[in-house]
Image: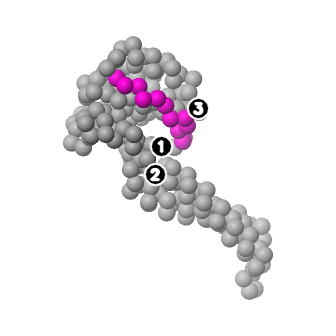
């Protein structure tokens, strides 16, 4: 699904969340594109609970690790070309393998850190969640954002529509 945006809704209770999930499913939003985050010990029953990718900074950390690790690895490959170790002939593959190795290592290390850090994009909702509200995150095609916001507005005036996130990585 290309061109996806994440919608944020603050919901007053589990019953409202259940009704909205049913409406979204009827509107052909896949179940795995709906994520609900609530205060600890809130029984979500059959609601699609937010996973590690939504609760933590895992995805942004991996993105940073890929970029930094790939850059450092490519630089190390260039250094190996300019100053080859004694008796070793380094070819252009050193840059490629350095970049790939560095990107892989950087992504792995960053993922280990990112999974232990709360999602910085959700900080603005922390107080509302602590007061008992539920945060629903829905990934929808960008050309249907207004359609889903209007659907929620019309059927659930008690819900606070908190806007969208501009881009969603393809893999969470």
Label 1 to label 2, Cα distance in Å? 9 Å
Q: Is residue 78 left or right of residue 137?
A: right
Q: Quadrant of the N terminus?
A: top right
Q: Residue 172: which disc? A: 1
The location of residue 137, given as percent across then percent down, is 41, 33
Q: Residue 58: which disc? A: 2
As helix, strand or loop, the secondary structure at mark 3 comes to loop
Q: Residue 3: which disc? A: 3
Residue 42 seen by the camera = yes
The location of residue 20, given as percent across then percent down, is 34, 22
Q: Earlier in the sequence, mark 1 or mark 2?
A: 2
| Contact check, label 1 and label 2, Cβ < 8 Å | yes
Q: Who's the residue at 53% across and 22% down the image?
A: 144
Label 3 to label 1, Cα distance in Å? 14 Å
Q: Earlier in the sequence, mark 3 or mark 1?
A: 3
Q: Which residues are magenta?
A: 159-170
As helix, strand or loop, the secondary structure at mark 2 comes to helix
The location of residue 115, given as percent across then percent down, is 41, 54
- Considering every residue shown, the one lying at the far bottom of the view is 86
Q: Quadrant of residue 9?
A: top left
Q: Residues within 10 Å of mark 1 (few under 14, many from 20)?
A: few
The location of residue 6, given as percent across then percent down, is 48, 33
As helix, strand or loop, the secondary structure at mark 1 comes to loop
Label 2 to label 3, Cα distance in Å? 21 Å
Q: Who's the residue at 37% across and 32% down the image?
A: 136
| Contact check, label 2 and label 3, Cβ < 8 Å | no
Q: Residues within 10 Å of mark 2 (few under 14, many from 20)?
A: many
Q: Residues within 10 Å of mark 3 (few under 14, many from 20)?
A: some
| Contact check, label 3 and label 1, Cβ < 8 Å | no
Q: Who's the residue at 46% across and 29% down the image?
A: 163
């Amino acid at each position: 699904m290309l061109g996806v945006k994440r919608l944020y809704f603050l919901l007053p209770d589990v019953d409202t969340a259940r009704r909205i999930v049913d409406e979204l499913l009827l509107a052909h939003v896949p179940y795995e594109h709906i994520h609900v985050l609530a205060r600890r010990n809130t029984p979500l029953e059959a609601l699609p609970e937010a996973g590690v990718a939504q609760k933590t900074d895992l995805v942004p950390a991996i993105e940073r690790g890929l970029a930094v690790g790939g850059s450092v690895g490519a630089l190390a490959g260039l250094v190996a070309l300019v100053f080859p170790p004694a008796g070793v002939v380094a070819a252009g593959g050193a840059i490629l393998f350095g970049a790939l190795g560095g990107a892989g290592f950087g992504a792995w290390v960053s993922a280990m850190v990112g999974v232990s850090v709360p999602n910085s994009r959700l900080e603005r909702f922390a107080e509302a969640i602590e007061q008992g509200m539920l945060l629903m995150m829905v990934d929808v095609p960008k050309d249907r954002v207004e359609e889903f916001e209007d659907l929620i507005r019309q059927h659930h005036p008690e819900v606070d529509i908190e806007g969208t996130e501009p881009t969603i990585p393809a893999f969470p």
